[in-house]
Amino acid sequence: MSDIKLLAGNSNRALSEAIAAYLGLPLAKCQVRRFADMEIFVEIQENVRGLDTFIIQSTSFPANDHLMELLIMTDALRRASARRITAVVPYFGYARQDRKPAPRAPISAKLVANLITRAGVDRVLTLDLHAGQIQGFFDIPTDNLFGAPVMVRDIKERLDLNNVMVISPDVGGVVRARALAKRIDAPLAIVDKRRERAGESEVMNIIGDVAGKSCILVDDIVDSGGTLCNAAEALLAKGAKEVRAYITHGVLSGGAVARIASSKLKELVVTDSIQPTEAVRVAKNIRVISIAPLMGEAIGRTAKEESVSSLFD
């Protein structure tokens, strides 16, 4: 472990410090600041020649600034002769743009993958990609970790599993929801919804009998919160006892926090892959659980050339 250097960007300093504490390593001295015109300047203030380096940086809001920080830090490490550069990206922004939904639309996730690769990153370590095929957008080794073990541990500690039902908020999330349901030996139901336009959703039907059940909505991203709130109302209308949501990435843009706070959701649980805002921290029905041990263990195993996939066996 003495050959490892951990570096933190500005996107989620608290998570970086928690990962460093788990590994028993200090964060490397690194200055990431802005010039007056908001240009980003990076200076690595420790020797990294021949070392295994890890940049911890989510590309969350402001996504473009944090992405540029990651690219410039990578260039600084490459020019300082680091032996290997791993980009640890707990939340990979632009992941929802993984295909062409209309003519003349970009596939921005592929563009961002190309930028990260060409900047000089040797390996990517990320968490719950919106679409698994994004791993194939990178021409370098990419490990996509899963937040399910962290969520399962929390669910087992807090809920009676005999009356739990896992819910996928849409058809596209069935694989993710089924994987979590299998871990806690719970039945699965699906919310069939139709999205009329971006940012809006209309719940159409519930596939499965949720009457009397404690329902757990499972997804990778919560942004506006509209889907979750609509799904909670539909589930309760079908006789569900209560509705919680376990979501990996709490984007929670705009008025999402207020929308969830006033909704029928009993609780929304998100990870700290994105640094929680003050509004999230004080919200009564939003709780944050940490992925630092999971990310720290994956970093340690990567450095020691050990299996990462066995974390999820």
Image (spheres, rainbow, N blue to C red):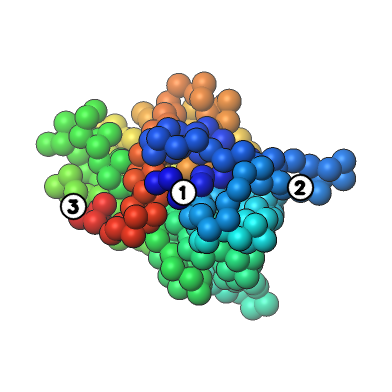
How many circles with numbers are drawn on the protein? 3
Q: Secondary structure at mark 1?
A: strand
Mark 2 → mark 1, Cα distance in angstroms: 23 Å
Number of residues whose C-alpha sits closer than 10 Å to that of mark 1, classed few (under 14), some (14–19) or many (20 or more):
many
Residue 310 occupies quadrant: bottom left
The disc, 2 or 1, on the residue closer to the chain's N-terminal end is: 1
x and y percentages locating residue 267 in the rendered image? 38, 30
Which residue does the image show at 51% across and 47% down from the upper left?
A: 5
> Does residue 107 show up?
yes
Where 30 sits versus 241, above or below? below
Looking at the picture, which amino acid does disc 1 mark? Ile
| Front of the two marks 3 and 2 | 2
In this rendering, position of residue 151 left or right of residue 30: left
> Does residue 205 show up?
no
Q: Are the residues tagged 3 and 2 within 8 Å (C-beta)? A: no
| Front of the two marks 2 and 1 | 1
x and y percentages locating residue 142 in the rendered image? 43, 65
The disc, 3 or 2, on the residue closer to the chain's N-terminal end is: 2
Image disc number at residue 182: 3
x and y percentages locating residue 127 in the rendered image? 42, 52
Q: Nearer the viewer, residue 99 or 5?
A: 5
Where 127 sits versus 140, above or below? above
Q: Nearer the viewer, residue 33 or 5?
A: 5
Which residue does the image show at 57% across and 74% down from the upper left?
A: 100
Image disc number at residue 41: 2
Q: Which residue is mark 1?
A: 4
